[in-house]
Amino acid sequence: MIQDLVKQRLLLQLEYDYEKEQFRRQTECMGVRRKVRRGLCWYPLATGRSYYNSLNQLVLEVRRTEDTDVEHLFEPGKPVCFFTEDASQMITYMKFTAQVSYVEDDRMVIAMPSADAIMQVENAERVGVQLYLDEYTYRLMFDALERVINARKGRLAELRDMFHLDAPIHKYQFAPVRFPWLNPSQEQAVNEVLWAKDVAIVHGPPGTGKTTTLVEAIYETLNRETQVLVCAQSNMAVDWISEKLADRGVNVLRIGNPSRVTDRMLGCTYERRFEAHPDYTQLWAIRREIRRMYDNPSGSRDSRHQKIARLKERAAEMEYRITDQLFAEARVIACTLTGAAHHLLLGKRFGTLFIDEAAQALEAACWIAIQKADRVILAGDHRQLPPTLKCPEAIRGGLDKTLMEHIVERKPKAVSLLKVQYRMCDDIMAFPNEEFYDGQLTSDPSVRCRSILDWENAIEWIDTPDEAEYQEQQAGDGLSRMNPAEAQLTMQTLKDYFTKIGKHRILEERIDVGIISPYRGQVHLLRQLMRHDAFWKPYRSLISINTVDGFQGQERDVIVISMVRSNDEGQVGFLRDLRRMNVAITRARMKLLLIGHKATLCKHPFYRRLAERVGESDETNGK
């Protein structure tokens, strides 16, 4: 057995047990009011209409009627459960689970398991909805790890030994293909993908065109293979790469829950393609006839059962034929890593598996898809966001170390670094380039010297005072932190900068802004300040406020970072995760404003170096 993978399984069990215990405490021990404040549930609910949506799902609309300013954690595709609370505050959970189909502000559309479930919710008094534990994904990951650990022969065992032991990787030998529209490092990366017999990694730092390179690699691979499997950790990442492939004219078949798919990709989903097939009308008529015969029995029982059996056999044969045709026509099968276990993909194998955003995926999740492939191409940046985990012990044990990181360490020759970035001006790029990429990145000439205002510093650090009012606080949910005085200073700093630029220019040139904080409590506070200040009304469509995770993969002309931490002990907490700070800094194209208490933050060497870099920039520009 492979010791790294055995350890992974133990750490994954820790994570699962931790999350299950958290859920148990939420359901059994935590009061409804506390759950509402933490964004885990909506209570009380007002129910709206129920109907079949465009995906033929039975859905129920609900609205929260109180605590509408509280940030919540509901997202499309997440499992939920309903509950009631009596006068003595006793909670009773309904015996079914449902799934979020759509959520916006205070309205949510939930896919329900049956009409009876809808009646149960509609007839209940004092009803609420709460996030439910997703155990299905854990089962898939545990099963994948068992398979790869116990593999004794075959391609799965070979790939495992290459990734975790000293088994060598191999390459094809043929002349490089020219791609004049790519830069040299992108062209090299695509050729390395084509040459790889076993594995290749496209390492794409911020703004280096990772998606462009990956799309080109997939497109060129399809000149050599009939079909490939493309996966990512999140539905958003799958849809993004799928859209780019569809733009190139590639036939993409999107597998997975349609409620998690973007509107643009809905037409590529298996369900929509199935319904659009010319034979679907006939299949639907057969199914309708079967339902009619069940609802209105006539004739002898044996004769009716024989006829229903024949109709069912005909419907099954027609369904198989439609599905087979859809898969035969598709060049790319796209799904999440867990979606690779979908029943439609049972028994299917692929010459090549592409995993995008591989540095954000747990290794166990990657193996779910790798089981179906002969070679693996990973793309991402292990210097940016790691996988999302909750158990501190599992994190300390190294569960957040991804398969991509293992391969980068053991097989550095498999890695192609994209070296030209097209996002940041030189002054913003310089610090993360030195800290995370060994100074190997260069800026494209089109972005190297750009700025919003002439003769301004691209990076500024506004130091918060040592006064007591600027000390950090616990947020209302007890889990996060906030700094109200720093939040006020953050918005005032941006207001002053907007005044300097001028309203007309901001609106005409659509100068966009991202306000980032590592802490959800501070994000909530910043959103409130903007919502209640009339100054921001003309600019609201240009400003986004979110956590670091919420800005992954995005970029803005101006980025403002509120770092929150200010204490006498020099504790930086969550800001110790330097990969998250790398993401925050590298979202900016032309201007980066840091708001934070230097005396606290600079006790950490990373932030001390950052402050020194900003100071050098000030001196260079005569400030």
Image (tube, grey):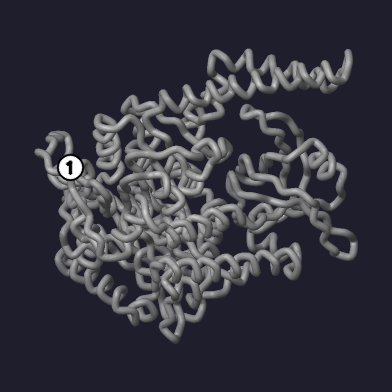
Q: Secondary structure at mark 1?
A: helix
Left or right of 32? Residue 364 is left
Residue behind mark 1: 191
Can residue 422 be seen at all in this image of the molecule? no
Kind of residue indicated by mark 1 = Asn
Q: Nearer the viewer, residue 401 or 279?
A: 279
Question: Is 406 drawn above or below residue 81 in the view shown?
Answer: below
Whole-percent x and y of residue 141? 51, 57
72 w.r.t. 209: above or below: below
Q: Horizontal placement of 43 versus 54: left or right?
A: right
The picture quadrant where one finds residue 222 is top left
Residue at image point 59% right, 21% down:
317
Q: Position of residue 441 (x, y in %)?
A: 18, 56
Question: How many numbered discs sit on the rendered protein?
Answer: 1
Taking depth in this image into account, of 465 and 426 the one nearest to the observer is: 426
Q: Determine the residue located farthest toward the bottom in the rendered image.
A: 569
Q: Can residue 571 be seen by looking at this rendering?
A: yes
The C terminus: image quadrant: bottom left
Most foreground residue, 574 or 244 = 244
Occupied quadrant, residue 73: bottom right
Say which quadrant the N terminus sits in.
bottom left
- At x 80%, y 18%, the residue is 292
Residue 133 x %, y %: 64, 57
Mark 1 Cα shell of 10 Å, populated few (<14), some (14-19), many (≥20): many
Residue in the foreground of this view, choosing between 605 and 355: 355
User: Residue at the spot x=49%, y=38% of the render?
Assistant: 345
Residue sitting at x 64%, y 63%: 38
Is 508 situated left or right of 104 in this image? Answer: left
Q: Position of residue 386 (x, y in %)?
A: 40, 61
